[in-house]
């Protein structure tokens, strides 16, 4: 900003001519440059267009003639035609005729000279020649190339520019000439004005300028004359005022002498120049003894004051001060006085000295001291109480505020004094404020008291307080009302605590939602509304899926923040008219009211699930959380809120069992089935905990060599009432729950334990275990398997074989492949169970690194009667051999089945034809007594 200001100052310091001619000159140059630039561009464009038009005309002129001559192959005439055209048109520099049988190129001998300077041609940026090739419409595509000199065009443009420059020069000359004449006239006017101004400054106030010359000169003279006349009038008025002020000063001195107030005068040197009779009486000093004496000797306290401070400009400086202890020479007493001091001036306005006045306030001080003592006692008493007290006069203006009142209103005492009571004591309720104002207005006539409870007091800072108020009139001893006093007490904290206790009793402290206690009230209102308006009420019980994992992985703080965000989303999604409550943990209840039909309910719940599934953000990290919702409908299901909530809970549990992240509508019949399955699953889990399960083992044999190759571990339930229960009666109930994982882990552990015992006894069999798809695809499967193998280091991992169903393996081939490969790195073998019942795709078989294929017993059982089953088994054996996999048939019930399998190339078998499943205690004895059937031996 400073460089810009310096530039402005430098510009203003230049002369008028410079400041006028420099911008005009720059403007002329800019406008002229722009004008000539546009002129040149327009002329160049026109010249180029004219040359190209000339070339096209040349084609129309020469084309037909040359084409005709070319067809007769008259080369000489073509040359003469081109030469004549070049001679007739001096702008043509070259003509070329191209034809399939002839090609003639002629150059002109005469060129138009360039009259314009070379620099001008450079500015135009126009080449020396322009050429254009034009193809005739003849089928032989003859071409005429015309090259034209641009010298004539440049010469024409130069001539136009020269003419325009001459015109511009003349116009600029006349502009500057006229400006010079105008400035000459103005300079003469300025000189006349300067001469008249100098005469006026030297005191010739009657000087006037002669009104003549141009209009501007006459206007300038008239303005100066009017101003000079106005200033002369002002000067005369000032002189008259000075005389009047001098007379007034003398009158003032006489008046001061007559005043009963003690007054003295001192000059600028501090010497007493006069005292009035009142001063002489106060101090017992005669006037003639005082005049001429230094004032600080007559009044010693003046030595401590700056009585010599006199304004150099002659302005009166007034001040006052209380002097507490002034000795009197009359009787030696001391008085207290209020001292006033002001400067005074002479007639010509110059400061001359000081006027001092003393007012005896001794009696007043005594009265004030007594009043102050009484006031101090009253204020101390008021400040010591908790109640706030405000007193006001009869007009409603503040007189006092105790400490409590200052704290509650936000007004300090010195700020509130003389303020209107309504300004300091402001109520939020206009009706209450009006009632208080009416009381204060009528307090003189009525003399009554005023009481109100639970008033909303607004402090100066805008804070609202709840107070109880009582007001009463202030009376004099004779009963006259002189004001009013207000006593009030802050009850805000008490009321807040009461509201807080009431709120906490009905709300969840973490999320701010209604809790289970207040949910019943919402329930009753919602049921009443649905009954009255014949609408549906959807009771939605919501439970977050896998919320415990968030707690375990991220901690309670993140889990609490997640619950708070879920609560906010629920409120935002369902709106204010649908209550939301938190029952505890990660369970919430939403009451969807005013639902017209089931479709609307399902739509709203789907929207709710979608909203909850959106990512949650915590400290720049995103987290996904989904929910399962159970829904019970009123009046479809039940009237009781407790029963509706229980039904919703059962439906929510069904949504969990169905895969989570979905909702389930309660159905009474299905609920019975769910409860039955739930009880059955609970009993199965109880059996696992009570060790009621037992492993049976079914042998696998090599039919061709007659040896036992391994065992398959099969689970049985040793039921206390039902005896031995097969796996098909209880495993399907838990295969889609985590109970199947616990059972699978138990089977692996028990199998390894039994294998360890057999190895100790000298039996090294490969033992296979069946693993459910849910268990196999669980994240902890590999880690748990590694842990179990580590517990039995005497069991080689390659002796453990895991059987998985072909259909389960095909659900996610890539994941199954990765888990199988990881397990095989530990040494564990794999078998595809029930092979042939799935898709049996060659690509899947290639991708799955299974060691063994087990032919499903449904094919083996009927292979002797069903040729299709026989063909399937043959195909499976062929696949196994092609992919270098072992193959074993299950369900071999007779020796004939074994013989048929051996003929097909399948040597390994298990089934009732070998042995039924047996407890571990009978396996070793059976192995010792096993004998290969004669038919199998013969087939070998």
Image (cartoon, grey):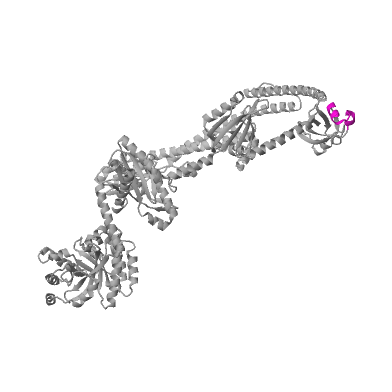
Residue 109 in view (yes/no): no
The x and y percentages for residue 291 are 88, 30
Residue extending farthest right:
289
Of the 4 image quadrants, the one containing the C terminus is: bottom left
Please tell me which residue lies in front, 23 or 550.
550
- Relative side of 448 to 908, left or right: right
Please tell me which residue lies in front, 472 or 25.
472
Q: Is residue 280 magenta?
A: yes
Main SS, magenta residues: helix
Q: Is residue 461 magenta?
A: no
Please tell me which residue lies in front, 855 or 381.
381
The x and y percentages for residue 409 are 59, 37
- Relative side of 856 to 746, left or right: left
Q: Which quadrant of the view contains residue 734?
A: bottom left
Residue 683 in view (yes/no): yes
Tell me where the magenta segment starts and ends, as one range: 277-292
């Amino acid at each position: 900003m400073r460089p810009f200001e310096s530039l402005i100052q430098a510009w203003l310091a230049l002369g008028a001519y410079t400041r006028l001619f420099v911008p005009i000159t720059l403007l002329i140059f800019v406008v002229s440059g722009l004008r000539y630039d546009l002129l040149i561009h327009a002329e160049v464009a026109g010249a180029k267009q004219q040359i190209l038009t000339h070339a096209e005309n040349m084609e129309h002129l020469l084309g037909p003639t040359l084409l005709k001559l070319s067809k007769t192959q008259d080369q000489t005439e073509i040359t003469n035609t081109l030469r004549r055209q070049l001679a007739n048109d001096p702008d043509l520099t070259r003509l070329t005729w191209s034809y399939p049988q002839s090609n003639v190129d002629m150059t002109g001998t005469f060129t138009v000279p360039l009259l314009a300077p070379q620099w001008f041609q450079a500015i135009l940026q126009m080449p020396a020649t322009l050429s254009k090739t034009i193809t005739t419409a003849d089928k032989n595509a003859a071409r005429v190339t015309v090259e034209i000199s641009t010298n004539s065009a440049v010469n024409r443009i130069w001539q136009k520019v020269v003419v325009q420059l001459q015109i511009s020069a003349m116009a600029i000359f006349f502009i500057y000439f006229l400006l010079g004449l105008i400035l000459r006239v103005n300079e003469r006017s300025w000189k006349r004005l300067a001469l008249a101004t100098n005469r006026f400054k030297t005191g010739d106030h009657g000087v006037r300028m002669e009104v003549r010359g141009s209009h501007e000169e006459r206007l300038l003279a008239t303005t100066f004359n009017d101003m000079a006349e106005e200033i002369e009038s002002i000067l005369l008025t000032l002189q008259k005022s000075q005389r009047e002020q001098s007379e007034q000063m003398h009158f003032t001195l006489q008046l001061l002498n007559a005043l009963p107030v003690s007054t003295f005068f001192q000059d600028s040197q501090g010497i007493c120049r006069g005292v009035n009779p009142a001063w002489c009486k106060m101090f017992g000093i005669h006037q003639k003894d005082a005049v001429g004496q230094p004032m600080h000797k007559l009044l010693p306290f003046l030595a401590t004051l700056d009585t010599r401070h006199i304004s150099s400009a002659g302005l009166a400086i007034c001040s006052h001060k209380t002097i507490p202890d002034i000795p009197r020479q009359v009787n030696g007493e001391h008085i207290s006085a209020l001292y006033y001091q002001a400067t005074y001036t002479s007639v010509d306005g110059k400061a001359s000295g000081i006027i001092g006045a003393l007012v005896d306030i001794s009696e007043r001080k005594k009265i004030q001291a007594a009043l102050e003592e009484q006031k101090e006692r009253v204020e101390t008493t008021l400040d010591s109480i908790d109640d706030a007290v405000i007193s006001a006069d009869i007009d409603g203006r503040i007189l006092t505020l105790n400490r409590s009142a200052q704290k509650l209103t936000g007004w300090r005492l010195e700020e509130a004094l003389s303020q209107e009571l309504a300004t300091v004591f402001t109520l939020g309720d206009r009706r209450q404020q009006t009632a208080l104002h009416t009381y204060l207005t009528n307090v003189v006539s009525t003399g009554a008291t005023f009481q109100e409870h639970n008033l909303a007091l607004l402090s100066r800072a805008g804070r609202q307080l709840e107070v109880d108020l009582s007001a009463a009139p202030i009376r004099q001893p004779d009963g006259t009302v002189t004001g009013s006093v207000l006593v009030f007490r802050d009850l805000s904290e008490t009321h807040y605590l009461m509201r807080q206790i009431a709120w906490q009793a009905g709300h969840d402290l973490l999320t701010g939602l209604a809790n289970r206690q207040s949910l019943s009230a919402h329930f009753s209102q919602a049921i009443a509304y649905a009954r009255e308006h014949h609408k549906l009420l959807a009771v939605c019980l919501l439970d977050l899926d896998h919320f415990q994992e968030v707690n375990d992985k991220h901690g309670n703080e993140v889990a609490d923040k997640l619950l708070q965000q879920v609560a906010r989303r629920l409120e935002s999604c369902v709106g204010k008219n649908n209550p939301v409550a938190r029952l505890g943990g990660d369970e919430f209840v939403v009451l969807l009211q005013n639902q017209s039909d089931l479709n609307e309910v399902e739509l709203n719940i789907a929207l709710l699930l979608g909203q909850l599934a959106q990512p949650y953000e915590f400290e720049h990290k995103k987290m996904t959380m989904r929910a399962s919702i159970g829904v019970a409908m009123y009046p479809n299901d039940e009237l009781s809120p407790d029963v509706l909530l229980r039904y919703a809970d059962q439906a929510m549990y069904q949504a969990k069992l169905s895969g989570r992240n979905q909702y389930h509508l309660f159905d009474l019949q299905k609920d019975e089935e769910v409860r039955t399955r739930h009880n059955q699953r609970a009993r199965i889990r109880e059996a696992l905990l009570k060790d009621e399960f037992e492993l049976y083992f079914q042998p696998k044999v090599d039919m061709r060599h007659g040896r036992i190759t391994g065992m398959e571990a099969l689970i049985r339930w040793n039921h206390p009432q039902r005896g031995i229960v097969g796996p098909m009666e209880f495993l399907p109930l838990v295969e889609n729950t985590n109970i199947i994982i616990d059972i699978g882990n138990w089977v692996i552990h028990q199998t390894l334990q039994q294998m360890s015992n057999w190895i100790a006894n000298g039996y090294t069999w490969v033992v296979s275990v069946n693993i459910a798809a849910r268990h196999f695809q669980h994240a902890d499967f590999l880690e748990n398997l590694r842990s179990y193998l580590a517990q039995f280091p005497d069991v080689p991992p390659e002796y453990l074989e895991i059987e998985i169903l072909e259909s389960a393996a095909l659900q996610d081939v890539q994941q199954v492949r990765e888990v199988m490969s990881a397990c095989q790195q530990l040494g564990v073998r794999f078998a595809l169970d029930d092979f042939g019942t799935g898709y049996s795709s060659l690509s899947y078989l290639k991708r799955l690194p299974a060691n063994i294929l087990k032919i499903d017993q449904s094919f083996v059982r009927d292979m002797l009667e069903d040729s299709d089953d026989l063909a399937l088994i043959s195909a499976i054996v062929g696949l196994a051999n092609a992919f270098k996999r072992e193959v074993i048939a299950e369900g071999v019930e007779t020796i004939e089945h074994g013989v048929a399998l051996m003929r097909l190339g399948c040597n390994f078998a298990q089934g009732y034809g070998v042995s039924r499943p047996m407890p571990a205690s009978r396996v070793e004895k059976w192995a010792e007594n096993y004998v290969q059937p004669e038919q199998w031996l013969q087939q070998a």
